[in-house]
Image (cartoon, grey):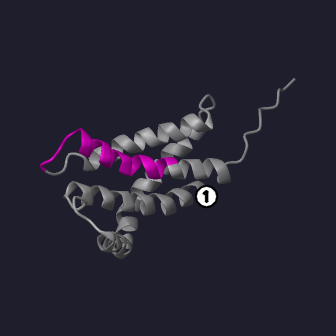
Amino acid sequence: MKRYLVFALVGPFVGGFLLLLTTTYQSGYWTQTNWGEVGKLFVVFFKTLQYSYLFGFLPALMIGAVDDIILHIRRIGPVLRVLLVGIIAFFLAAFTYGGRGSESGAVQFILYGLVGFVPAVISSWLVYKYIDEPQQPAAASA
């Protein structure tokens, strides 16, 4: 249960910020900017944070479920699990957001993929580091 709580809290927060950064970059906002406009970016982020959680809650829980499923595969270690969860989240986010707009291409695909990859890797790593209990080897029955 703690695993899903970590994914639900961290995923929409980090993913919402990265989605805001990606959309502002795609719109050309970062061509001429100053510190005042960077401050406006953070104001917009905190004003729209509720929507990040509203629309990012279920995708974060789904990625948490993928992490939980991969945890139960004995041959996959924690580092590989974190990378697999990140790769799956990368492609899900890239295909969800990457085909939108008139400027579809490799840069847009990668930027929107990172919106899923980074929160998934951070959440999976936090779960591995602080939540997962060490697996006890199965006792040999005689």
Image quadrant where one finds the C terminus:
top right
Q: Is residue 112 magenta?
A: yes
Residue range of the region highlighted in magenta in the rendering: 102-121
In this rendering, the answer to whether 43 lies above or below 136 is below
Residue sitting at the far left? 102
Q: Is residue 1 visible?
A: no
Image quadrant where one finds the N terminus:
bottom right
Image position of 23 (left or right of 42): left
**73 or 32, which is in the foreground?**
32
* Number of numbered discs visible in the structure rendering: 1
In this rendering, the answer to whether 41 lies above or below 5 is below
Q: Is residue 35 magenta?
A: no
Crowding at mark 1 (Cα within 10 Å: few <14, some 14-19, many 20+):
few
Q: Is residue 87 visible?
A: yes
> Which element carries disc 1, helix, strand or loop?
helix
* Location of residue 110 in the rendering, given as x and y in whole percent from the top left corner: 31, 42
In this rendering, the answer to whether 127 lies above or below 73 is below
* Location of residue 58 in the rendering, given as x and y in whole percent from the top left corner: 41, 58
Residue sitting at the far right? 142
Q: Quadrant of residue 21?
A: bottom left
Please identify the dominant SS of the magenta region.
helix
Q: Residue at x 35, y 63 (%)?
A: 55
Q: Residue at x 62, y 33 (%)?
A: 77
Image position of 69 (left or right of 89): right
Q: Amino acid at mark 1?
A: Lys
Q: Residue at x 55, y 34 (%)?
A: 80
Q: Which residue is mark 1?
A: 2
